[in-house]
Amino acid sequence: MSFRTCERRVLEHERASNGERPVTRREVEALVKTGLYHSSTGSPTSASHWRRALTDGSCLHLVVEPGRCRLHHDAFDPHGNLLSLMLHMTHEARSEAVALTALAWSVVSLLAQRGGQPQLSPPPPQAKHAIGVPIEHQ
């Protein structure tokens, strides 16, 4: 597997770091042009996100914002498989994990409320009176 210089600098990071480095717009264009980076999602939502899957299950994450571009190493590739996505969410995307958990809880709560409410029954039948016939008084 071959890497560009900016990718090697990121991958040489210390264990406690994700190796984040600023990259130039020219480097962004060159990285995306390789076809190894695929469009992705992430935080901040206003940025463009690109990920390159690595053979060990991790990925390089390219974040392109209006004012800056940066590249870092994610220990888990969220596009790899479901387990990798869950590990990514708990390890590197905690705020997104909390938001998704809150959304899921809201949906479950809403569904539970709908299931627990009594069904509306039709109104009781009304006595039928012929038009023009006087009602007797008691």
Image: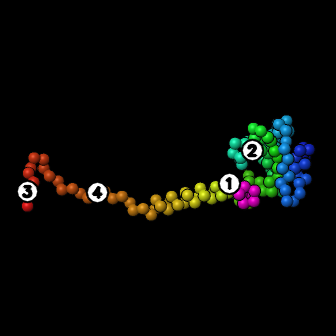
The type of residue carrying mark 4 is: Pro
**Marks 3 and 4, the one that precedes in the sequence:** 4
Please tell me whether residue 91 belongs to the stretch shown in magenta: yes
- x, y percentage for residue 75? 80, 57
Label 3 CA crowd tier, 10 Å (few <14, some 14–19, many 20+): few
The magenta segment: 88-95
Residue 49: mark:
2
Label 2 CA crowd tier, 10 Å (few <14, some 14–19, many 20+): many
**Marks 3 and 2, the one that precedes in the sequence:** 2
Q: CA distance from mark 3 to mark 1?
A: 71 Å
The type of residue carrying mark 2 is: His
Q: CA distance from mark 3 to mark 4?
A: 25 Å
Please give left or right for residue 9 compared with residue 132 in the image. Answer: right
Q: Which residue is mark 1?
A: 96
Q: Which residue is mark 4?
A: 123
**Marks 4 and 1, the one that precedes in the sequence:** 1
- x, y percentage for residue 42? 72, 48
Image quarter for residue 47?
Answer: top right
Q: Which residue is mark 3?
A: 136
Please tell me whether residue 86 belongs to the stretch shown in magenta: no
Residue located 10% across and 46% down the image: 132
